[in-house]
Image: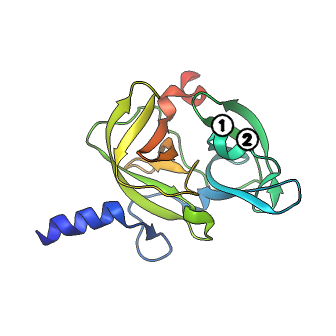
Amino acid sequence: MKLLSFLIALLIIPTSCSAGPKPYDHNPNSIVQVVCMDDGGKSGWFGSATRIAPHTYVSVTHVTSEHNCKVNGTAITVTYTNVEQDFSVFTGPEGTAFLPVSCKGFKKGKAYVMRGYAGGGTDDFFQPVIFTMYDLQTHLALFVGNDFPGMSGGPIIDSRGRITGTVNISDPTGGVDLRDTILCRRK
């Protein structure tokens, strides 16, 4: 019973990645916070993104469609967006840490980790989730577990440390499967 309570707590309570071991083997510096300002220069929106190449990031359209978005104080340039899928690609500051992309899709019953800057905080969080099904109306992958505002655009990572999707919605917990995006249709 104690084990079951612990597993349920893992699915419900976000855990700061800065406190303790990482559940999956990947470089946390590849996950960044996206900060978008309103026209008056005040913070308007926070989200997350994942670096997949030295200058290339993936996120979601509802984060990157805002004006004056920056990563680490550097303006981003959106290079691809698909509003229907809520998926975007942008260029931003150079970095050496990035996650490899998996185009294999989610597997029912398998565990994944959602990462992102919950609540616009300064530390990214990881949240264990289990893939359950695809919503045939929205084409989103649905999971058992929670994500939180600010995690939108962050990665959904498989057990090999590869980005398999992006965090999209929080009620129900869902994401975009990279298999269905331009990143994987080209391969």
Q: Relative to the observer, which residue lies in front, 168 or 57?
A: 168
In which quadrant of the rendered view does residue 147 lie?
bottom left
Disc 2 target residue: 65
Image coordinates of residue 157 in percent, x first then y, are 45, 49
In the structure shown, which secondary structural element does the residue marked by tag 1 occupy? Answer: strand
Image coordinates of residue 41 in percent, x first then y, are 87, 61
Q: Amino acid at mark 2?
A: Ser
Image coordinates of residue 141 in percent, x first then y, are 41, 36
- Count of numbered badges drawn on the protein: 2
Could one spot residue 102 in this view of the protein? Answer: yes
The answer to whether residue 176 is above or below residue 187 is below
Could one spot residue 24 in this view of the protein? Answer: no
The answer to whether residue 118 is above or below residue 143 is below
Which residue occupies the extreme right position in the image?
40
In the structure shown, which secondary structural element does the residue marked by tag 2 occupy? Answer: loop
- The residue located at (70%, 48%) in the rendering is 54
Disc 1 target residue: 88
The answer to whether residue 31 is above or below residue 21 is above
